[in-house]
Image (spheres, coloured by chain):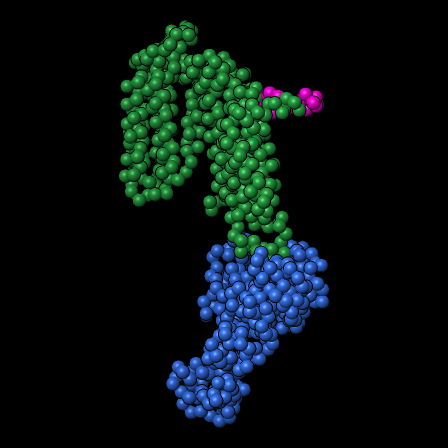
Chain colours: A blue, B green
Amino acid sequence: MIRFEGISHRYGSVQALREVSFGVPQGSLCVLLGESGSGKSTLLRTVNRLVEPSAGRVLLGGRDVAGTDPQALRRGIGYVIQSVGLFPHRSVGENIATVPRLLGWDARRIALRVEELLEMVGLDPGTYRDRLPGTLSGGQAQRVGLARALAANPPVLLMDEPFSALDPGTRRGLQAALRRIHAGSGKTILMVTHDVEEALALADRIAVMDDGRLAVEGPPLEVLGRHAPATVRRMVRAEVLAFHRLAALRAADSALPGPAPGAPVLPEGATLRDALLLMLGHGADRVALMGEAPRHVTLAALLAASGSGG
Amino acid sequence: MRDPRNAATGLLVLLPFALGAALAPWLLGWIAVAPNRLLSARIAPLGATGPVAIAWTAYHAALIALPLAAWRPARAWMAEAVGVLAALALLAVVGLGASAAVPPGGLARAAPAAGAWVALLLLFLAISTGAALRGATPALPLLAVLGGAVLLGVSGLLDPLSIMREALGRGEELRQALAEHVILSFSALLLALALSIPLSALSISRHGLEAGFLSVASGLQVIPAIALFGLLIVPLAALGAAFPALREMGLGGVGPAPAVIGITAYLLLPLARGLLAGFRVAPPALVEAALGQGLSPRQILWQLRVPLGAGVVLGALRLAAVQAVGLATLAALVGGGGLGAIVLQGVGQLAADLILLGVLPVLALSLAVDAGIALLSRRLAPEE
């Protein structure tokens, strides 16, 4: 869906991007991971032409974006940024309606769409539609930002550190909303973050950027797995990486049959990281898994699955 | 109501003004009477008629009430209202006193004496201070004083004063000058807006243009107004001589043209600064988000920068409009007409009344413009 072909970019004397080439398959959620200044944001912004690369080209659905009208291009791409950037003098509903209005939708269709989107991002339309952005919390504002980006149903969504400014609880809520929307809509999402945990929680592909270069790109467990490349290991301590990796593994996959009497119970669909946290919290070496047949996860199985055990 | 920390602040600040306004007429006289237009005036006693006594009592009562009205910060506007009443009572004392002192129909002329002028000035300062205490502009109460003075004038109460005699004798001339003055300042303001709005809008994203525009605007600011008007006469005269059509449109050497162009030049800097600051009220992240949604630079200007910066822009417009009214007074020096022509005449004849007759409408005009735009910006940008 998105292809970067030999993208290089200079800001004055700074080489921000060096010959970056890779593709983001249709319907995938690809996370651009890297430290600040690694060029990940600049690369993201070449897709909607907020940055015009000095060399190389970006293909979107097979078409070179350089040949398109920038305004028309951007109206067809959802864009979410860390500071949200809602228009402070317009209501939540009007903010969400920005792109549909630019595209000339009629008022009825816009009103229906706004309602649908507010529900999709978990905000009650009756309560929030007419409020001004200044009255929203950070998490609510970014939910509106997400709804605005989705308003005209664009096939591609660009997200630049969308949840980085939020507290951990709010961030998890928004990540869950995004996961749900991605699973339900099949949109192609390219997202920038410096948070390894977030990358593992959301991505089905991860591209690691280092000093303007693409260090590695592939499925999360390959990129951040036991044999992670040196760049990744330099960015994150191995133990931390191993801990976060547990978040990408479902507890059910490491479960053994049979009951575990007296052990704390893990909800269905939990990850191995949830299992480890529950064990730590209760001082137990096994947790029972909720479900029809009695199953449980042991510490040994968890260590074996994470690859850190022996 | 900006600083209601201490209830006594208003009282303590306004007390000296009230005391001064009470003492000044006693020390420096209420009215001065001259036997005719050429001889100099001398301080004359107030006549002891009933109406004078009533106005005199009202004046002093208002002066006592003035600091007391400022006692409650939440009602600070009351002090300004009382100040307006005091100023009008003072005018009534002077007008009634003059009619008692000068026999009607004679050559003798009466005018407010220095004491009355000082008291009036102190009351203006008290009103301005009262407005500043609650964070407002004094334009509205000062305008009320002028409006009240006009009403007193229309009622005939001030007729015995020499300035009113001048005004009555020159009614047509005064109206003509006022109309010219409004046209001069308004057309200069429009011209300056027509230049600075597009240039500022283009300057937002072009640093070279912004630097050039601002340095030209500030460069013009350091040329003295008279010099600029004078300098403009030469090229305009040449232009008029070369193209008779232009001359017929009024674009000759002397006249309103150099004045309007000169005033426009001075308005560029305050307008450009205000417009650029206003256009930049919208934070960069917001502009970035708007760009990312697919808004064009023009849409970002009108849907984001203008509504968010309206308060700042209107503030600059207010400054520029008041400046235009003031600068238009100088137009008379290059034959451009306006109220300045009456002031110049007064200076030429050493006639203080005539100077005042030119200056007071300028004052009223700039207060009206100031109050009008302030009202407009409160309506359009209530969060300011």
Residue drawn at x 62%, y 54% as measured from the top left: B295
**Residue numbers of the magenta segment:** B240-258
Percent position of residue B100, x then y? 35, 12
The percent coordinates of residue A91 (x first, y second) are 54, 55
Question: Quick check: B329 above or below A180?
Answer: above
Image location of residue B263, percent across then percent down: 55, 29
Residue B374 on image: x %, y %:
48, 37
| Residue B335 location, quadrant | top right
Residue in the picture at 45% in, 23% down? B360
**Above/below status of B176 relative to B13:** above
Q: Is residue B343 left or right of residue B186?
A: left
In this orientation, which residue lies closer to the viewer: B167 or A283? A283
Depth order, front residue of B273/A181: B273
Point 50% across, 43% down: residue: B311
Q: Is residue A114 visible?
A: no
Left or right: where B89 falls relative to A271:
left
| Tally of numbered discs | 0
